[in-house]
Image (cartoon, rainbow, N blue to C red):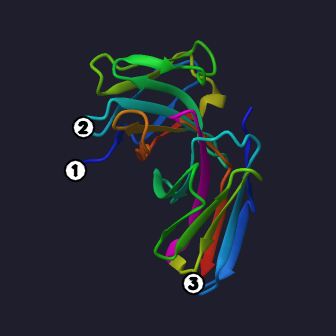
Amino acid sequence: KQEVTQIPAALSVPEGENLVLNCSFTDSAIYNLQWFRQDPGKGLTSLLLIQSSQREQTSGRLNASLDKSSGRSTLYIAASQPGDSATYLCAVISGTYKYIFGTGTRLKVLA
Amino acid sequence: GAGVSQTPSNKVTEKGKYVELRCDPISGHTALYWYRQSLGQGPEFLIYFQGTGAADDSGLPNDRFFAVRPEGSVSTLKIQRTERGDSAVYLCASSPTGQETQYFGPGTRLLVL
């Protein structure tokens, strides 16, 4: 059974810092991996989707990497801003549709 | 265009009551998914529809939970004899054909007293 773990569970950093969020999964037979952002009381916003054949994806200040063989993905956020404060969720996609989520990392960026 | 919408945004009910949660997917999306997110946890898969039929309902926790999508667009998640443990955010998502990224709605926050 696929299990997804995110470390740390919570993180508080001063504005401007670069930071890394970690995601690990137990079964390397994944279809894709996706990072989401969730603001309090809101739904999920997709940040980056990495296909299983890819090693990384970049969007603005965000960079996500994928190492299937070791069952790991990282989300790198450069020059963090208070507006980045949210919960970040990692989801592995088994088959073509079944998303299995981690428990998330709650990020707080202090002004 | 409009995204995935869910109604109600909040629902408070008493233990033992019946509730219905509604999801309007993005127009034209044939695939629709329901997830449940408990406090401090990530969303957990409940059921996947392809058109009108449930292609995978392996995530439904028990027979008190049922979902329909009679015309292949709007879906309703139905919970009978609600229990306090059913309190959670119920998220709906849709995708064009079921093989692309999923687009999530804002969720319905269910509180069972």
Q: Residue A13: image x %, image y %? A: 68, 79
Q: Are marks 1 and 3 on the same chain?
A: no
Task: Tell me the distance, in whole angstroms, between the alpha carbons under discs 1 and 3.
Answer: 32 Å
Task: Please indicate whether residue A85 sits to the left or right of residue B55 in the image.
Answer: right
Whether the residues at callouts 1 and 3 have beta carbons within 8 Å, the answer is no
Residue extending farthest to the left is B1
Query: What residue is shown with label 1?
Result: B1
Whether the residues at callouts 2 and 1 have beta carbons within 8 Å, the answer is yes
Which residue type does callout 1 highlight? Answer: Gly
Q: Main secondary structure of the magenta part?
A: strand
The magenta region covers: A83-97
Host chain of mark 1? B
Task: Please indicate whether residue A51 sits to the left or right of residue A9 in the image.
Answer: left
Is A87 above or below relative to B3? Answer: below
Is B13 above or below relative to A4? Answer: above
Helix, strand or loop at label 2? It is loop
How would you rate the neighbour count of disc 1 (Cα within 10 Å): few for under 14, some for 14-19, many for 20 or more? few
Residue situated in front as seen by the camera: A70 or A87: A70
- What mark, if any, has residue B27 been given in the picture? 2
How would you rate the neighbour count of disc 2 (Cα within 10 Å): few for under 14, some for 14-19, many for 20 or more? some
At horizontal 42% and vertical 24% (from top left) the residue drawn is: B49
Query: What residue is shown with label 3?
Result: A79
| Residue B14 seen in this snapshot | yes
